[in-house]
Amino acid sequence: MGSAPEIAAEARALVQRLLALEEGTVRARAAARALEVLGPERAARVLSALVRREGDDGATAAVGAVGLALLDPGSGLAVEWHAELYVTAREGNLHEVAGLLLSPPPHRTWEEPLDRADPRLSHLSLGEKKTLARLRRDPDLLARLAAEGEPSVVRELLRNPRLTEPQAVRIAARRPVRPETLRCLFEDRRWRTRAGVRLALARNPYVDTGIALLLLPTLPAGDLADIADDGALHPRVRELAGRIAEGRGWRGRGRSP
């Protein structure tokens, strides 16, 4: 159904269409409508072409929009469409596309530490912490609030214009951490587009595995190869990372295309 050049042209057209829209819900729902029009079989091939375009920022943004669409109940993509796309991708050995549709639980289970109270924060109410996270400039205080990892506080912290990318990466890389805290980063439009944040989330065994799988196609082949070799991560994450890296011709550390 469509030659390789035709599929590549459709992938480029989808990228151009999505990049003309604001990143976030608007772009994600446009991606959903475009995929629905294509139908599951052609959509699977177009998505595969996008995933394989390493180093193309437009393709990365388009795959990110598709990922958001697949997580958004309001995107308009029916459960039956998801199922048909998954079956089509599996039957066509398009593992990089099938992986976008899986949502296993986190590989590591979060357990509340018995003693983690920060003496500078222990007397504050949740509301006070949220206000400080959103408004304060003190880098030490912001780091302490981030370390506590309360999702509602972290969500406010991510809105603070004083928060830097290295600080956001540290939040994404923290272990142990609540999966809900990591989801805040993925859902934040300002931070989910940062390459360092995406990589830290994908490499965190406490993240929802479905989020990690959606992030993999946006990462460079070298990082994917590292993820494939990381025994701390979910087997599905490692498998898909390796398949995408190989599909892009990765030849490092003995891997072959």
Image (spheres, rainbow, N blue to C red):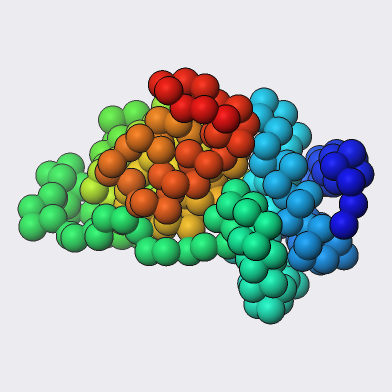
Horizontal side of residue 8 vs 156, given as left or right? right
Q: Is residue 151 above or below residue 250?
A: below
Please identify the quarter of the rendering in which residue 143 is found: top left
Which residue is rendered at x = 58% and y = 52% of the image?
A: 95
Q: Quadrant of the C terminus?
A: top right
Horizontal side of residue 223 vs 14, given as left or right? left
| In front of the other: 197 or 146 | 197
The picture places residue 146, in percent across and down from the top left corner, at 32, 42
The picture places residue 154, in percent across and down from the top left corner, at 39, 49
Q: In this view, does 204 lie above or below 43?
A: above
Residue 120 makes an appearance in the image: yes
Horizontal side of residue 218 vs 34, given as left or right? left
Residue 128 makes an appearance in the image: no
The picture places residue 139, in percent across and down from the top left corner, at 34, 29
Which residue is rendered at x = 55% and y = 55% of the image?
A: 99
| In front of the other: 109 or 2 | 2
Q: In which quarter of the image is the N terminus?
A: bottom right
